[in-house]
Structures are given as C-alpha cells and as structure tokens.
Image (cartoon, rainbow, N blue to C red):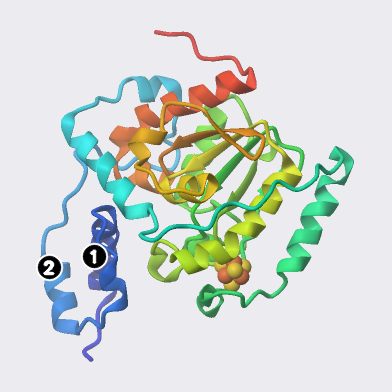
Amino acid sequence: MARIDPATQEALLERVRFYRDLGLTEFYRRPVDAALLAQLAAEPIAQPSSPIPNQDQGMGAPGLASETWDSASQTQTLHEDEATSPRRPVSAPPQVAAAVPASGHAAALQIIRDEIGDCTRCALHKGRNKLVFGDGDPNARLMFVGEGPGADEDAQGMPFVGKAGQLLNNMINAMGLKREQVYIANVVKCRPPGNRTPEPEEGNTCSPFLFQQIDVVRPQVLVALGATAATYLLGTRQPLAGLRGRVHAVRGTQLIVTYHPAYLLRDPRQKKEAWADLQIAMRELGLKLPAKG
Ligand code: SF4
C-alpha cells in the first residue's frame, strides 16, 4: 500500500469525522486502499458556516446569545442523533446501588477503579494507551457523561482534556462553576479506534462501571453529552432532539441531555442550544441564571 503523507491523512481523518456526523460508520470496518484514501482527501470537505472557535472562545452566555439558528443547523442536529447512537439495543441499566456516605465517595470510586484494573473485558483494550476512568469531585452535585476517550484523553488518562475538553471547561465556567467542582466520566473507558462510536457490545460491557460511578457520586444533576451517553443512561435509543430541553429521571438524579462538545466544535451554531440545555441544569441546581439581555 502506498504511503500517505500527514496532510492527506489529516484531511482523510476530518472526512471520516464528517461521515460519522452523517451516520456513516460502517466503512470503519472495511479495508480501504490508498487510491481511495487519496481520492477522498482530495474532495472538498463540507464545513459549518461559522468558524470553529479557538480554545479560549468559550460558551459564555453573551457569545452564545449572539449565535444564529437556521434550518441548516436543524439538519446537523438530526445527523448527530444518527451518528452517535448505537445501532442495536443497549442493555437495561442495572439496579441503583446502595448509597455510600459522602465521606466514603473517594474510596468507593477507587474500589471501582481497582475492580476495572488492567481491563480486557472488551475489544477496546487492544488499542488503549491509558484507561480513562473519570475525574473530578467525588461529591459533585453535577456530573457530565461523555461517550469515550479521544486521542488526547487516551494519551493522558484523563477525560475531556483535548479541544473538546477545553470547550467543556468553558461550558462549566459559563455555569458559574469550576471543573474541580464537577465529576466527569465516559460510557467507555478506553478509546475506540478512530474515535468511532462504541459498539453496543463495548458500551454494554463498560457502562456498568459508569453506573457504579454515578451511584457513588450521586450527583443532583447528570448531563449527558451527546446521543451515545444519553442512550446508555436511559437504556434506550431515542433521537437527541426529542431528549433535549427537558428533565429526565435516571438513577435517582435528574438527567439533562445536550450536545457533545466535539460536535459543538464542528458546528458552533449549536452552542446556543447547548447553552439553553445547561441553563436547565443550572435551574435544577439552584445556580444563578444569567440576566436576559
Ligand atoms: Fe474494559 Fe471498558 Fe476498556 Fe472495554 S472499554 S476494555 S470494558 S475498561
């Protein structure tokens, strides 16, 4: 097979991500030859009309309020529904575990981490550099749940530390909180190859650990970042558009569903909608809402 230069490789990866947004994931498992890779990379890639923000351009309410909403963004919403939901049913979430006293949350989380160990329970361990367990305050009132580690997270062993993580930090700050005050975890603890959506077998194998983490932390509010997180937390696949904008009851906590920060980086027009979701979480937490301008 011919060698692929880094620029072509990056263009191809961007196209793969774009196809994933369109719900096309099957080609991950097909052999692709170099000629096809070069052809794909040479084709123009559709871009959102708004530029991707730099790492310091965050989710602050003023910026979000100025974002526009149009029919094209609604199309993108449907695409994320299709792209990040498992295609086969997910397992029903397990029974909620008995509550752990607040003073024991950190130790209980460490027990879960020890139980996971150097896990080989699903195929995702094969490509893993570092297992990404979770991060944050074991007694947090607010917990975010993402899909799975990306390249930066896999390298550092921490959730949401890449560009999407920086955007999540900005989202948290816009809510009037610091990252250290929340808890963050993913449906799967190991990076899926090429950042693809976890297969149902992988999500079903790993998500019980997430449920254990939730049962220990017992946040007042859970925020599902993207359709995959929402699907596993709710135990059923539903379009993201039908899940956003309201409060769900999950494991004794209130669940808010919003877009994954990686998706917001690709389509910043949706940040206004995400901010509306976060304000629902703020209301449930009793946090001060921004004045309406
Ligand atoms: Fe184990 Fe979860 Fe990693 Fe699969 S994704 S190997 S179940 S820790």
112 sits to left or right of 19: right
User: How far from the left and from the top, in percent, is residue 128?
Assistant: 55, 74
Distance between mark 2 and mark 1 Cα atoms: 8 Å
Q: Is residue 155 visible?
A: no
Q: Which residue is mark 1?
A: 11
- Can you say which quadrant of the picture contains the N terminus? bottom left
| Residue neighbourhood size for the residue with mark 1, other residues' Cα within 10 Å, grouped as few (<14), some (14–19), many (≥20) | some
Determine whether label 2 and label 1 are within 8 Å by CB.
yes
Question: Under 8 Å from ligand 1: the CB of mark 1?
Answer: no
Quarter of the image where one finds residue 58: top left
Question: Looking at the picture, which amino acid does disc 1 mark?
Answer: Ala
Q: Residue furthest bottom?
A: 1
Give 34 or 237, whichever is nearer the viewer. Answer: 237
Which of the two discs, 2 and 1, labels the residue nearer the N terminus? 1
156 over 1 or under it: above or below: above
Give neighbour class at mark 2: few <14, some 14-19, many 20+ (Cα, 10 Å).
few
Residue ID for mark 2: 42
Viewer-side residue, 275 vs 284: 284
**Mark 1 residue element:** helix
Q: In front: 249, or 131?
A: 249
Image x and y of residue 214, in percent: 68, 46
**Quarter of the image that includes the C terminus:** top left
Q: Is residue 55 left or right of residue 140?
A: left
Three-letter code for the amino acid on which mark 2 is drawn: Ala
Please name the residue shown 50% across and 23% down the image.
280
Where 246 sits versus 10, above or below? above
Residue 110 in picture, x, y percent from top left: 79, 58
